[in-house]
Amino acid sequence: MRLGRPRALRSRLLLAIVAGVGIALTLLVVVFNLVLATTLAKDADEVVRARAEAELATLRIDGGVVSVPASRAVSDIDTRTWVFSGGEAIEAPPPDPRVDAVARSLSEGAERSIDLGDDIHLYALPVIADGVRVGTVVSGVSLAPYNRTRAIALIASTALGLIVLSAVALASALMLRAALRPVARMTADAAVWSESDLDSRFALGPPHDEITQLAATPDGLLDRLAAGMRRERRLTAEVSHELRT
């Protein structure tokens, strides 16, 4: 079964260049976005840890009971922080049943963090007094800014990769056309010379690169063809002379 007409050399070279650069750019975009996602996740975790530790530093513990100083400034409404004394919440952000339920579940158990879907990252920090756990601080941070940054970075890096790939393809096509133009011209000239003009040569001098080496080959071939035809002409002339004699 025939697979169709073979591609020209220039097309094959261009396809190889674009494919190679495309694979490299794809790997770079994937690695960049994976590293960015890991970095953003780490930043979000550091933010909630810092909030929980700052909240813990302001708490008062008296007789195994955790309390919040009345003189402490009210937290920013956007800051999600819960303070549990035992299993009772003594401080909480504006009600959100879904988030409140998860925060309450974190009031028991070891220090840990959890993602509530793609919306909120929560971190639970036990409150310890005299080696006994008396409460828990749960801090949360919205993941919306981090997700927005990831989406923008993905779109921007993909667009940049496509722009770079298009520029490479265009530049490669122009360079290949310019590089192979002498080859096409020599091929056409050699075809004409071999039929009607055996004395013409490319005459590019001693071979020093691929183009001059390619030119030297048909020059040598034409020299041999011209020498053979001159011998044939001399032989024909001599035979004609003998016949006339």
Image (cartoon, helix red, strand yellow):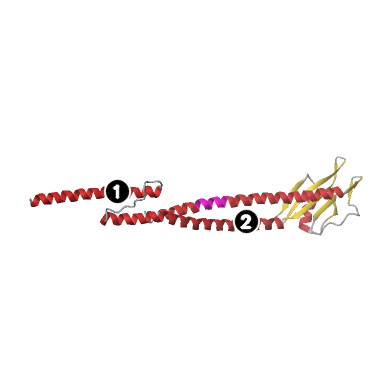
Give the residues in magenta.
19-27
Q: Which residue is mark 2?
A: 154
24 is within the stretch colored magenta: yes
Q: Residue at x 46, y 57 (%)?
A: 174
Name the residue type under label 1.
Answer: Leu
Neighbour class for label 2 at 10 Å: few (<14), some, many (≥20)? some
| Tally of numbered tags | 2
Q: Is residue 36 visible?
A: yes
Q: Which residue is mark 1?
A: 221
- Please name which of the two marks, 2 or 1, marks the residue nearer to the observer: 1
Main SS class of the magenta portion in the image: helix
Q: Residue furthest top?
A: 131
173 is within the stretch colored magenta: no
**Would residue 61 be found to the left or right of residue 52 on screen?**
right
Q: Residue at x 78, y 45 (%)?
A: 111
x, y percentage for residue 23?
Answer: 53, 51
* Residue 120, quarter of the rendered image: bottom right
Task: Classify 155 as above or below 211.
Answer: below
* Residue 160, quarter of the rendered image: bottom right
- Tag shown at residue 114: none
Element under disc 1 = helix
